Image: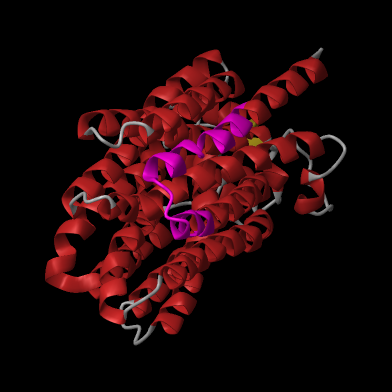
Amino acid sequence: MSQNYMDVQEFIDQIRFGKIQKLILLLCFCVVAIDGFDTASIGFIAPALKHDWGLLPTELAALFASGLMGLMLGALIFGPLADRFGRKTMLVLCIFLFGCSSLASAFSPEIQTLIFLRLLTGIGLGGAMPTAITLMSEYCPSARRSVLVMTMFCGFTIGSALGGMISARLIPMIGWQGILFMGGILPLILLPAFYFLVPESLRFKVLKRHSDADIQAIIKRLAPELCKQLVLESQIQKKNSSSIRELLSRKYWCSTLLIWTTYFMSLMIIYLIASWMPTLLTNIGASLEHASLVTAVFQIGGTLGSISLGYLMDKWGADRILSAVYMLGALFVIFSGLSTASLFWLILSVFIVGLCISGGQTGLNAYTAVFYPTHCRATGVSWANAIGRCGSVLGSFVGGWLMSFNLDISVILSLLALPALLAALSLWVLRRNRQSSIL
């Protein structure tokens, strides 16, 4: 049998986007959708928990923060492990962990147990999301990578929107326990399909010099019409240095810090809105249905932003587009704070904030997955998410802290313009640095 030598990415670029890649897209979409469902539903079960257990706002903030702390720890732990042991291996482990933990949390007898189980759930989710992003990006053709990764990540915003709407309607019937039960059983149903049908990253197998039989089996699944045996190579040589150390090496340290800053600011905005918007709106007299509508509109805007920004990023450049949308998002965050008296204008402004900030966060995930090379890609994506989770933890605490001062909702929302502007500035500096390095 004749042999051809080809780079892994060149092979991915030349074959059609077939059944296996579409399956990976679908299943990774489902993983991040469950993450989105979990993120939104915890905000909507908070009033029910407060009523059933007589919780204080500080105890609710601790509940929110425990899940977000878990997300941060999961990203820190599982990213380097995915670069060492494989994307699929760690993803299957993470799905099992957050499924079982969420299922157990439905039977929590008191708040301390629930806080602990939310921490475990967050650890699993925190490792799953960046690993799914990495796996998907490594099966995408170069010309369509941004739009495909961002289409996959639409699962998060769709899951968040559905999580809010489903929770608002089902809590009176099945209680907060039923919502947590749903969040646990869904990933466990997904797990067998992921384990048996999804292949390990081809890039990872080539880089780690796995057996030729394993690599050829994946090649045949991707391109069954191929009649010649391919010997795939990687332009990046296998390195023995730590993938974490590589992120802060002389080549990457400045860009890494700028990416981390953007993640921190972006996720602080997203999680403050997702966690506290229902409570903020109900505090000023809005019904739970209206609160769920406004929060769902934020996620719908993020979904549409993810799809549209993916095309723009592939065409015009990721950092240029992302810097512009975060700037626009800052303006409409201020406008949303001034529009709470009108449901129409509030919905419109929150929709645009979702399109820019939530859609921009999706684009940032796609950008980061391309920015780092294969040997430290999972670590790069997951550690950026981990730093972002620090922002989300801060957002949860800041939301409760600002509410303790009885500040108006317009003031709280308007203050979110500052982190949006800092995210835009970080991306602008990152773009200038990359241009100067090329020159």
Q: Which of 357 and 213 is in front in this view?
A: 357
Q: Does the magenta stretch include residue 22?
A: no
Residue 59 lies in quadrant: bottom left
Q: Which colour scheme is used?
A: secondary structure
* Residue at 26% from the left image edge and 78% from the top image edge: 52
Q: Can you give x and y, in whole percent of width and height, for residue 42 in the image?
A: 35, 62
Q: Can you give x and y, in whole percent of width and height, for residue 117 in the image?
A: 45, 77
Residue 283 lies in quadrant: bottom left
Q: In this view, does 376 lie to the left or right of 408?
A: right
Q: Residue furthest left?
A: 173
Residue 430 can be seen in this image: yes
Quadrant of the snapshot with the N terminus:
top right
* Residue at 45% from the left image edge and 70% from the top image edge: 63
Q: Is residue 117 left or right of residue 78?
A: left
Which segment is the magenta one? 397-424
Q: Can you give x and y, in whole percent of width and height, for residue 198 in the image?
A: 43, 52
Q: Residue furthest right?
A: 250
Q: Does the magenta stretch include residue 407?
A: yes
* Residue at 72% from the left image edge and 46% from the top image edge: 375
Looking at the image, residue 119 lies above or below residue 134: below
Q: Which residue lies furthest to the front in this view?
A: 406
* Residue at 56% from the left image edge and 47% from the top image edge: 201
Q: Nearer the viewer, residue 399 or 142?
A: 399
Quadrant of the snapshot with the C terminus:
top right
Residue 221 can be seen in this image: no
Q: Is residue 115 left or right of residue 138?
A: left
Label tally: 0
Q: Can you give x and y, in whole percent of width and height, for residue 55 in the image?
A: 36, 76
Secondary structure, magenta segment, majority class: helix
Q: Is residue 176 left or right of residue 10?
A: left
Looking at the image, residue 3 lies above or below residue 28: above
Looking at the image, residue 230 lies above or below residue 34: above
